[in-house]
Amino acid sequence: MSELGRTVEALLFLSSEPVSAEELEEATGAGALELAGALLELGEELAPGRRGLILREVAGGYTLASDPHAEDAARSLLGRPRQGSLTPAQLETLAIVAYLQPVSRPEIARIRGVNAESPVATLLDRGLISEAGRSEFGAVLYKTTPVFLKLFDLASLEDLPDPATWDPTPEEEGELRDRLLAAGDARAGVAAE
Amino acid sequence: MSELGRTVEALLFLSSEPVSAEELEEATGAGALELAGALLELGEELAPGRRGLILREVAGGYTLASDPHAEDAARSLLGRPRQGSLTPAQLETLAIVAYLQPVSRPEIARIRGVNAESPVATLLDRGLISEAGRSEFGAVLYKTTPVFLKLFDLASLEDLPDPATWDPTPEEEGELRDRLLAAGDARAGVAAE
Amino acid sequence: MRLAELEFDLDVFSGPFDLLLTLILREEVDLREVSLAEVVISYIDHLEARGELDLEATTEFIVLVAALLELKSRLLLPGEELDELIELEPGEAVEELLARLLEARRYREASAQLARRLAGAPKVRYREAPLPPELRRVDLEDAPVGLWDPQSLGRALGGLLAHPPRLDLSHVLVARVSVSERIAHLRRLLRKAVEVSFDDAVAGADRMTVAVTIFALLELYKRGELSWDQDEPFGEITVRARPRAAVGALR
């Protein structure tokens, strides 16, 4: 294996976050072409099925991961499932942070309609979100982390689907509006009696 | 590479601590002899000079490490960005320690309105703060270090800028510590609603 | 199942819980006509059918129902109007409500999408290990003197001194008079006189304050600090301080 390939492997092993090609160039002093060659070489060495590790491209960079075939042994050794599953409250909080970042806890609470303290604390603990300064009112703001991108296998936040995809059709929206207006009228009718 | 060798490589990659032969046997379900063979195979694959990683036998078991030849590149990748800037959370935590020292982590958390574990750990790692005994309640207290003074170009703590310049409510009376705690409580109250 | 999606079939309302809540908050459904007991019983039925206790959802439910109970008890006090809480015109209220429902729906869909994405992500693990010690301690000692501006410390501290404006996120929990205030008030009166008439204790107070004073009275009774007599329904209530010794004996 080339010296550059070996250095890249070591860097990816040490870094807790995916490393971009630019960062690798800068750290190794290699040119773009040379580095692309080293990554290709490393990718072949660590192709699925060859070793215990595989090379992955995620979260805007390169990173090493364990081969899925070792999952049972890893669970047995580390004593925990690959990723503790997320509760609906945590997923919803994560979705709000992912789309609206940076966003504060009161804002999350407003959208969800309930206090967001516990899901925010868990997501922080698991490294899926992190602090991103403070709002003008002094509330801590949150953003998603590279761990989030890794866990959800996203190259970047741009890979998240446009939330407008889920907005109702104009017909559905009209129906909902009518339903609400009807509820209001019924209420007004009661009051008038 | 044998399937067992690959699994062992994956396990050593995932574990941040050395793993003993017994633990590896238990996790993989392999016999002692079989496992010794896999470790031998892995040791050859990861012999110094072959890859970016090397297999090390240390007290307590086996572990993967990056090849020392990559150390300069690693320092360049992982050292510099950390040196260059402080995150808002770290800066806030450092300011609290600087002005209130000695101060405990629970106090820092109360003032900031969020858990202070991660910024405190980073500031400790970077040598900007250090432990300064324990409070009457047994919490570890923190103070700033000489490195802190040097990096902010301060002759002594007396030279810290007067916070009155940035005080949003200068008319309020009371000790700085009490006012910071009160403001933190107020922010926490808003966030909890 | 999420609490918000739980379907209720009540006398005055049929549909998901979050719609019921929103309608109530916008006064589109009259809370006075909603049987909260029915809501609670439906929820317990749902829990039973499900066979397991989702602690998070149940906590959420208890908080919401408690808030609804408080709001309803205020509504039931004659003269206590909710006008100030409902500032929007009916048409505006519908648009506002619609916007909020759509927003909530958008992020519910987004979280479902994330859940699918998580389930479909490759079954790999990543290394979570600290940097080796020789790399961890960055050589800050070699960093230049004055790398950072001391003014940034003062600015950070100044930011921490700021008190946030009181953001009123919950119309339900607007407390204008607190039980602890009324406890202090009763204690003050009972320090001056051994016996106080309840009417005197709440002279000139609005109905909300009267109601909260009754809570304060119950609380002090529970703590053994006072007792009271009422000879006949709607009659005069005489509040009496308990001697200190008796209070001590009760503890």
Image: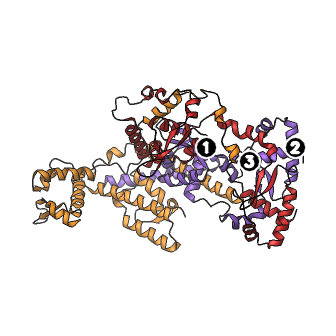
Chain colours: A purple, B red, C orange
Q: Nearest to the eye among marks 3 and 1: give it.
A: 1
The quarter of the displayed image where residue C148 is located:
top right
Dots 3 and 1 on the same chain? no
Q: Residue C204, percent across and down? A: 16, 47
Which residue is depicted at the point 70% across and 68% down?
A76
Which residue is depicted at the point 80% across and 72% down?
B32
Residue C132 tag number = none
Dots 2 and 1 on the same chain? no
Chain of the residue displaying label 3: A
Quadrant position of the N terminus of chain C in the picture: bottom right
Give the vertical position of A94 relative to B101 (above or below).
below
Q: Residue B151, percent across and down? A: 59, 30
Chain of the residue displaying label 2: A
C136 and A106: which is toward the camera: C136
Residue A3 tag number = 2
Q: Residues within 10 Å of mark 3 (few under 14, many from 20)?
A: many
The quarter of the displayed image where residue A189 is located:
bottom left
Q: Residue C136, percent across and down? A: 67, 44
Residue B125 tag number = 1
Q: Residues within 10 Å of mark 2 (few under 14, many from 20)?
A: some
Which residue is depicted at the point 12% across and 64% down?
C229
Give the vertical position of B10 relative to B90 (above or below).
below
Kind of element beneath mark 3? helix
Residue A14 tag number = 3
Q: Is residue C142 visible?
A: yes
Q: Residue B90, percent across and down? A: 56, 39
Please name the amino acid that badge 2 sits on.
Answer: Glu
Which residue is depicted at the point 81% across and 59% down?
A52
B147 and A81: which is toward the camera: B147
Could you tell me if the residues under marks 3 and 2 are in contact, i.e. CB atoms within 8 Å? Answer: no
Q: Is residue C227 left or right of residue C153?
A: left
User: Which is more N-terminal, label 2 or label 3?
Assistant: 2
